[in-house]
Image (cartoon, helix red, strand yellow):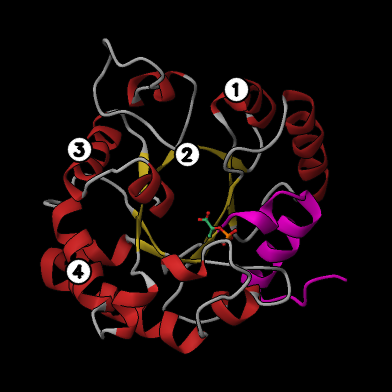
């Protein structure tokens, strides 16, 4: 299964910065990379990215999408509009959206369904807080997030295991803990969806950097990474992707 290494820019980059980044990334990435790369710009840069990445091996993703097709939802952008721009992936249930914007498991489920309805692959983020991990509830929390968000497997899916305490902190999970959680997620997928569950890619996310990417990406249980801070520089993002390829990241 081809790993997916995704760059979540969050609320960063002007249009000019986005253009400079994408131009450099397009220079770095060969025409047929053994790992799939995807870039998730802010909405303001999505149309530009769609044009620049068209025909390239780099996929386009959106950081969020509203489940309704259209209507009175000021400030929102729908999955329908994203599909119209050629968006291939959409992040659903990122912990920042759950925590800062109060998104519930049910709302995340509606987004996942809508993404499939418009032919977009959802990247469903799941993960526990530090308190939940310390209380021995990490799997209980992740299982609840999975069960509510994925009632049926109606299309291609990526699951990003992102322990909340590892996001943006510079302190990644121990690879063994990420591996253990990925195993549990895989077993859950198999129990619920049989062979179809095997097609789902499981990413790790949380303070992935060029220096540690290989520790996660070379684990057979993990098929990619969702990267925030360290994806903001094209060279750094490409070095992380090389960690998935198994090559020694260039200095
Ligand atoms: C993220 O935003 O999903 C993330 C993992 O961020 P960071 O890599 O900065 O921890």
Q: Residue at x 36, y 69 (%)?
A: 129
| Magenta span includes 54 | no
Task: Give the extent of the magenta segment.
Answer: 227-251
Depicted 57 relative to depicted 240: above or below: above
What distance separates the C-alpha of mark 2 from that of mark 1?
A: 12 Å
Depicted 102 relative to depicted 141: above or below: above
The quarter of the picture where residue 155 lies is top left
Within 8 Å of ligand 1, the CB of disc 2? no
Q: Earlier in the sequence, mark 2 or mark 1?
A: 1
Which residue was labeled with disc 4? 143
Q: Residue at x 68, y 65 (%)?
A: 240
Which residue was labeled with disc 1? 44
Kindly indicate whether the residue at mark 2 contacts the one at mark 3 (C-beta within 8 angstroms).
no
Which residue was labeled with disc 3? 110
Q: What secondary structure is marked by label 2?
A: loop
Does any portion of residue 153 appear in the rendered image? no
Q: Position of residue 130 (x, y in %)?
A: 39, 75
Q: Earlier in the sequence, mark 4 or mark 1?
A: 1
Q: Earlier in the sequence, mark 3 or mark 2?
A: 2
Q: What is the residue that sits farthest to the bottom in this orientation?
A: 176
The quarter of the picture where residue 213 lies is bottom right
* Tag of residue 63: 2
What distance separates the C-alpha of mark 4 from that of mark 2?
A: 23 Å
């Amino acid at each position: 299964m081809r790993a997916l290494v995704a760059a979540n820019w969050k609320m960063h980059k002007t249009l000019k910065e986005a253009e400079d980044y994408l131009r450099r990334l397009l220079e770095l990435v060969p025409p047929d990379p053994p790992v799939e790369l995807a870039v998730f710009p802010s909405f303001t840069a999505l149309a530009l990215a769609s044009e620049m990445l068209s025909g390239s091996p780099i996929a386009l993703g959106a950081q969020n999408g509203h489940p309704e097709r259209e209507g009175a939802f000021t400030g929102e952008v729908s999955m329908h509009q994203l599909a119209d721009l050629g968006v291939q992936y959409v992040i659903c249930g990122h912990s920042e959206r759950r925590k800062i914007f109060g998104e519930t498991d049910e709302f995340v489920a509606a987004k996942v369904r809508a993404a499939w309805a418009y032919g977009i692959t959802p990247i469903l983020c799941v993960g526990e807080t530090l308190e939940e991990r310390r209380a021995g509830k990490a799997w209980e929390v992740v299982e609840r997030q999975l069960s509510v968000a994925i009632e049926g497997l109606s299309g291609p899916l990526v699951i990003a295991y992102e322990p909340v305490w590892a996001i943006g902190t510079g302190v990644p999970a121990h690879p063994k803990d990420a591996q253990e959680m990925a195993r549990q997620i895989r077993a859950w997928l198999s129990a619920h969806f049989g062979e179809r569950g095997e097609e789902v890619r499981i990413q790790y996310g949380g303070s992935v950097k060029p220096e540690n990417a290989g520790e996660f990406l070379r684990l057979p249980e993990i098929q990619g990474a969702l990267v925030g801070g360290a994806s903001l520089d094209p060279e750094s993002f490409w070095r992380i992707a090389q960690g998935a390829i198994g090559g020694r990241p260039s200095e």
